[in-house]
Image (spheres, rainbow, N blue to C red):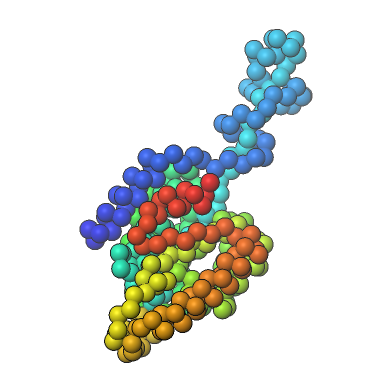
Amino acid sequence: MNQALKKILIKTKKQVFSEIIGNNVSFQKGEGYDFCELKEYEYGEDVKNIDWVISAKMQKPFVKVFHSQKELNIKIVSLLNGSTYFGTNKFKQELITEIASILGFICVKQGDPFASYIANETCELCTKKSKKIFNVNFMAQQLYDYNVIGKNIDYDYLTNDLFKKIHHKSIIFFIGDFFDIEKLDLKLLSKKHEIFVIIVRDKFEEEPNELGNVNFNDPATNQNFEGILNKDTIINYIKKVKENDHKLFTHLQDNAIRFVKIYTNEDATKKLIGLLR
């Protein structure tokens, strides 16, 4: 295993298992560990839940009612396209691997099974449904080593394919940079599942510096670009990025989808905890 990947896994595992991230609690009543209320005993209820102290005081049997705890179906969808092969602090692909690993370790800690996918022109199953730490390590390896050069995101295919593949109600995490989102439509998917969107960006992408004459290679299309990165070019570019993000944020808010933006120089764990609480 690559040393950089080992550091990611050690770091994320340590953060998740040392941070105070409690188990998910359902507010339905049933079997569990979190006390909800006391109620008068009814014929057929489990006598193991009788509170004998309260029952003695009240001169009739009372039982403890708990919040039920159910396993959540978690799906981690990493959008790996050419534009994730970029970063001034670290590559966005590396940050996506880190975020996916954090989510995977949270699932392991909470006892919730998760499956993962790699999406671009297609949507491939990366790891099958599991609660094991091995699954997190294997997923991280696949994401870190994946060749993103020449790959683009087909949002229309992605959402339709996931709608067909994921039959049971799930929590779906989408992780990607979410540029060129003209065909992104999560409305149908959000009616069936609970969706979280994690936007991964590099500061330079949103606020580039004046570099003068430049020679760029687009890792998504493999096309070469030569030009001048001056003030006017930057102003036009920033305008397009803001238009893209305004459309993205409006779409997510209209469909009650929670989201967060994480930059390559930020602490991913803290931002994720804020999103999940």
Residue 78 horizontal/vertical position (percent): 45, 65
| Residue 41 versus residue 154 in the image, above or below | above
Residue 79 horizontal/vertical position (percent): 45, 69
Q: Is residue 85 left or right of residue 250?
A: left
Residue 234 horizontal/vertical position (percent): 41, 80
Q: Residue at x 35, y 80 (%)?
A: 219
Q: Residue at x 56, y 71 (%)?
A: 246
Please state which of residues 6 and 94 is positioned toward the viewer in this rendering.
94
Number of callouts in the render?
Answer: 0
Instruction: Kindly tell me whether residue 162 is visible in this rendering.
Output: yes
Q: Quadrant of residue 99?
A: bottom left
In which quadrant is the N terminus drawn? bottom left
Please state which of residues 109 and 260 is positioned toward the viewer in this rendering.
260
Q: Residue at x 37, y 53 (%)?
A: 267
Q: Residue at x 44, y 47 (%)?
A: 106
Residue 37 horizontal/vertical position (percent): 68, 27
Instruction: Kindly tell me whether residue 134 is visible in this rendering.
Output: no
Q: Quadrant of residue 265?
A: bottom left
Q: Which residue, as the protein is rendered here, is positioned at the far left? A: 3
